[in-house]
Image (cartoon, rainbow, N blue to C red):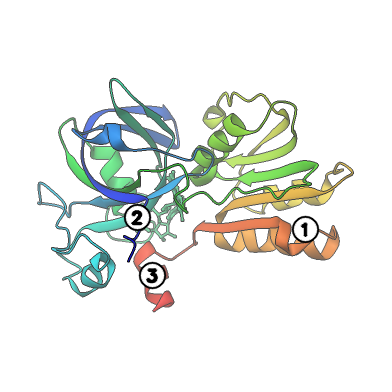
Amino acid sequence: MTDAPPPPYRWFDLHVVRTERVSPSLVRVTFGGDRLGDMVVGGRDQRFKLFLPQPGQDAPVLPDDLGMGWYAEWRTQDPAVRAVMRSYTVRELRYAPDELDVDFVQHGQDGDGPGHSGPASHWSRTARPGDRVAILGPVAEENGGVDFQPPAGTDWVLVTADESALPAAAGILAWLPAGTPAKVWIEVAHPDDVQDLPTAADADITWLIRGNTGRPTLDAIRAAELPEGTPYAWTAGESGTVRALRRHLVNDRGFDRRTITFTGYWRQGATEEDLLAELG
Ligand SMILES: Cc1cc2nc3c(=O)[nH]c(=O)nc-3n(C[C@H](O)[C@H](O)[C@H](O)COP(=O)(O)OP(=O)(O)OC[C@H]3O[C@@H](n4cnc5c(N)ncnc54)[C@H](O)[C@@H]3O)c2cc1C
């Protein structure tokens, strides 16, 4: 009998090293940890699970079983006590010193009423050096947590993102082979959220500043002239918006639906717990 290969993910105990307000909508938290040097990422939109303490706790309360049964146990833990679980993207991983950057969107307002900002956004805003978190993060380049996978034969790529997917778009642009034609739309709340996104691709990046109404990305793509050739599209951000974008690309632009990777990173009016509850 052969041994099963080790899982490409592992738990890491991390602490905050420093925080930085990158722009009006984004706070960058830099994490460190004894074994962070074991983390290996696949680049692009590499995601991971973040586990935060509840208010008043000094460390996240994790399941006892940190093996294959962790999720089943996390679901049975008291929601008021168990760690707050969220999905985030690796903005940058560096070694020696081993540091992980994660960019958190600052959304809503603090408090419990309408516009409540959510525990992760709030946590990032108030994080201090030494604050403890845990993550379930990759330890191999091929780890199943990278969705940007252009098929062979792709002639050009289309990328759309809002602030929550800006770290992923930055990772995709940094990864794209030199000269790849790329049409990119990034929608942000504030002109000062625009940032430099280094790439070797032949990228045409359009920044869209959101107003109070409308769907700027959808409107911009509807009006855009797209290149000839076989496209691959990656779109992430608010769920309703990415679904509408996908519909437009398939129905009006004739994209093959198998060449579109679309991911709702959040949904208007729903917390991540609400979304998990829907999955059953
Ligand atoms: C694969 C993946 C990767 C992701 N990477 C990142 C990342 O690198 N950085 C990042 O900031 N987010 C990222 N997200 C999105 C993030 O997980 C969600 O925004 C999450 O809901 C934030 O948790 P919260 O506790 O702040 O808010 P929640 O408690 O989940 O939600 C509270 C309220 O805030 C609203 N809300 C949630 N997110 C936003 C938002 N971005 N803008 C406006 N309103 C919002 C909800 O609709 C809800 O009404 C990613 C999501 C996925 C699936």
- The image position of residue 224, as x and y in percent, is 83, 44
Mark seen at residue 249? 1
Residue at the (83%, 48%) spot, across then down: 230
Calculate the distance from the C-alpha at mark 3 to the C-alpha at mark 1.
27 Å
Depth order, front residue of 35/76: 35
Which is nearer the N-term, disc 2 or disc 1? 2
Q: Is residue 23 above or below residue 149?
A: above
Calculate the distance from the C-alpha at mark 2 to the C-alpha at mark 3.
10 Å
Which is nearer the N-term, disc 2 or disc 3? 2
Crowdedness near tag 1: few (<14), some (14–19) or many (≥20) residues, C-alpha within 10 Å:
some
Q: Which type of secondary structure does the marked residue at label 2 adopt?
A: strand
Q: Quadrant of residue 76?
A: bottom left
Q: Is mark 2 within 8 Å of ligand 1?
A: yes
Depth order, front residue of 139/203: 139
Residue under circle 2?
Answer: 86
| Residue type at the position of mark 3 | Leu
